Structure formats: C-alpha cells, structure tokens
C-alpha cells in the first residue's frame, strides 16, 4: 500500500476529510493515517473514514514520544503543532515496520489526478522534498525556505531515517516563527537536507504541491474534459493554503502577495475544492450536529486599512456566483504579486 499521513483538529476537519476523499479516489492503494488533535476529530474520522483511514490520538503520540510531550507546555499552539510533523512520521515508521515509504501531506491539500507521480519522484531515493518554486518577483526563500513541508516523503532506510531524526531534533529544539533566515516553524530546516544527507530528491514535477505562491510561474491549461495541466504535466495535488470562507458567498483567496488567479482557472480549481468541502461538511454534520466550516469574517479578512485597500483593489476577495468565482478586476489581479514585489524592491533601493 501507499502510506500517507497528516494531522489536524476540528477547525480543519472538513479540509482533512476532503483531502482523504480526493486521495482515496486517486490512489486505490492509499492508506492515510491522521493524527487527530482533538477528540471530536478522532471520533468523526473513525466513524466515517473507512478501512483505509487510521486515526492516532494526540495523547497516544505524546505517550509514545516523551520528548515531544516535554515541549508542549513551553510553546505556543502554533509552534507546538509544527513540532508534530517529523514526530508523527517517525512514530509511524517505528510503530509499523511494514511501512517502507511514507509521505506527509498538509491537511489543506487536494488531489486532482493520480497520486502515482509522488512515488515516481521519490523513486529509489530516501527523501523527497518539494521546492516552493517561487516566481522571481516574490522569492521568499530566504525567510521561509527553498522547500515547502506540504509534501515530503521518507523511505525506511538509513539515509531516510537519518534525515528524519535530524529534522525531529531541530524541531524539538525550536519551531519559532521568526522568519529570520535561520528558523521558520518546521520548514526552514529542509534547506539543509540536500547537502547534509544523501539520497534527497528535489521534486521536479510541476503538478505536485502547486500552490498560491507558485501558480504564476507556471502555464496552466484546462482540456475539453475539464482536466488541468501544469506546464504540460497533469495537476496532481494543489495546496489550498490561506483560502478562507468569509461569509455565505464571499471568500478570501489569500493570493494578494503572489498574483490573483484568472477567473477560469480559479473557478475550476477552487470550485471543485469548495464543492468537496461542502460535501465533507454535510458528511461530518451527520455525525457531529452543528458542525460548520469556520468563517473568518470581514474584520479579520480586511486587516489594517492599507492592506484592506490593496486587497479590495487587486481582487483578493472572491464572490461565488454559481460556478463562477468573481474577483471583479477583469484580469488585473494577476499582476498584484509583481506590483508588490516591484514596490518592495524600490523601497530597498534595488532595481
């Protein structure tokens, strides 16, 4: 079987279930293990996840990993959650020796086609990492790292375990969100892997971990059957980071920094994803009455007045009208990332 893992709480329960449904549909050999960060998440997933979805309660992981339990009291919730990633992967490899390779997936991913390219990219290597693939006008590698934790994979061999153990040690030492070039949660450490460890493969498939921060550097095409291709390759899995519901029909795309997607592309990708989230919400509500996908609200979405003006001007907020996701900028929004990048370079005195 192809083994995957993720973690989330009730706040991401719909996203996590949508991820699983999309993965199960695209990989008949998939087995997903979810670290449930609260009891409601564990109960719901055990009831509706099916035979190929396993649940690990947070208390069980903490009991199995005393070093992780020690850091819980000294960190913010966000910093503690970032420490979970390598600890979960390590725990699963130690608990089940039948797992020969294991991929970690962020809970806000969604599969659009066959998951097999992930394993082909890993190939005979020990570790797979996915580059951020920032466009040149928005290269945040210095702060956030060259690689994104959204999709990483490890093989059960000496090199894979050495890399995983080192990552865990670093995350137990610090998952500070400083963005100072030395540390950023669990992510900045990945920069050292290719030089420090053998057998590290950098994913070259443009359709794996495609995301708001890198869509603008790729060429997208939608075929007659509705399939999506990225630089002539199939879109495998998209990372719906920063996507939030504001109200019944309004959504925050979170794309201002990178460029707002053209209407046809966002309607295709985010339309399918939102339909999957609504389906997951209904499925969860049948087991957990009153459950609803969290709404961020306008006050939190708008932010400070100067950011509110930028977000409105560039079309960061989308109105869902049937199958169309309207930004109201007539294509202008796709240049927001370039414009903000130019402004920052000008402020720093760069050309």
Image (spheres, rainbow, N blue to C red):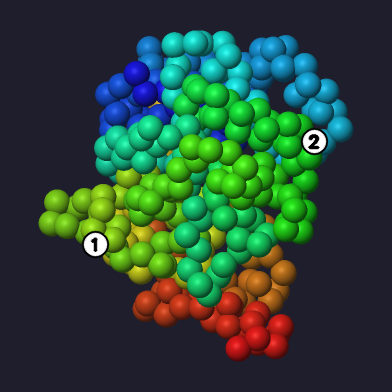
Task: Tell me the tag on residue 173.
Answer: 2
Residue 279 falls left or right of residue 188: left
Q: Residue 323: which quarter of the image?
A: bottom left
Quadrant of res 31: top left
Per the image, label 1 sits on a secondary structure element best described as strand
Residue 335 coordinates in the image, percent (x, y): 46, 78
Q: Is residue 271 visible?
A: no
Q: Which mark is residue 269?
A: none
The one of 119 and 210 positioned closer to us in this rendering: 119
- The answer to whether any part of residue 254 appears in the image is yes
Residue 105: percent from left, percent from top:
49, 36
- In this rendering, which labeled residue sits more in front, label 2 or label 1? 2
Residue 19 in the image: above or below residue 256:
above
Relative placement, left or right, of 33 versus 347 is: left
Rendered position, 37 above or below 318: above
Q: Quick check: 83 left or right of 135?
A: right
Q: Please identify the quarter of the rendering in which residue 113 is found.
A: top left
Q: Which residue is mark 1?
A: 221
């Amino acid at each position: 079987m192809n083994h995957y893992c993720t973690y989330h709480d009730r706040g991401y329960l719909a996203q996590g279930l949508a991820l699983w449904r999309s993965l199960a549909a695209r990989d008949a050999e998939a087995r997903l293990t979810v670290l449930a960060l609260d009891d409601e998440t564990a109960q719901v997933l055990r009831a509706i996840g099916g035979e190929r979805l396993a649940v690990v309660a947070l208390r069980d992981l903490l009991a199995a990993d005393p070093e992780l339990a020690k850091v819980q009291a000294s960190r913010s919730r966000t910093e503690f959650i970032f420490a979970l990633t390598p600890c979960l992967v390590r725990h699963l490899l130690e608990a089940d020796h039948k797992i020969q390779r294991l991929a970690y997936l962020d809970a806000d991913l969604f599969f659009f086609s066959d998951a097999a390219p992930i394993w082909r990219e890993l190939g005979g290597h020990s570790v797979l990492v996915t580059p951020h693939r920032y466009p040149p006008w928005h290269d945040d590698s210095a702060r956030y790292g060259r690689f994104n934790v959204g999709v990483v994979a490890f093989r059960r061999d000496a090199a894979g375990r050495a890399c995983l153990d080192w990552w865990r040690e670093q995350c137990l030492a610090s998952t500070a969100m400083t963005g100072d070039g030395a540390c950023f949660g669990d992510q900045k450490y990945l920069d050292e892997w290719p030089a420090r460890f053998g057998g590290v493969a950098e994913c070259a498939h443009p359709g794996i971990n495609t995301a708001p921060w890198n869509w603008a550097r790729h060429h997208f095409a939608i075929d007659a059957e509705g399939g999506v291709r990225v630089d002539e390759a199939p879109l495998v899995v998209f990372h719906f980071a920063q996507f939030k519901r504001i109200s019944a029909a309004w959504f925050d795309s979170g794309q201002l920094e990178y460029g707002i997607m053209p209407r046809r592309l966002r309607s295709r990708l985010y339309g399918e994803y939102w339909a999957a989230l609504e389906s997951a919400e209904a499925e969860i509500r049948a087991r957990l009455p009153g459950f609803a996908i969290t709404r961020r609200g306008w006050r939190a979405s708008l932010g400070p007045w100067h950011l509110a003006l930028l977000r409105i001007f560039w079309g960061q907020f989308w109105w869902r009208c049937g199958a169309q996701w309207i930004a109201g900028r007539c294509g202008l929004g796709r240049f927001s990332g370039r414009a903000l990048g130019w402004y920052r370079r000008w402020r720093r005195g760069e050309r």
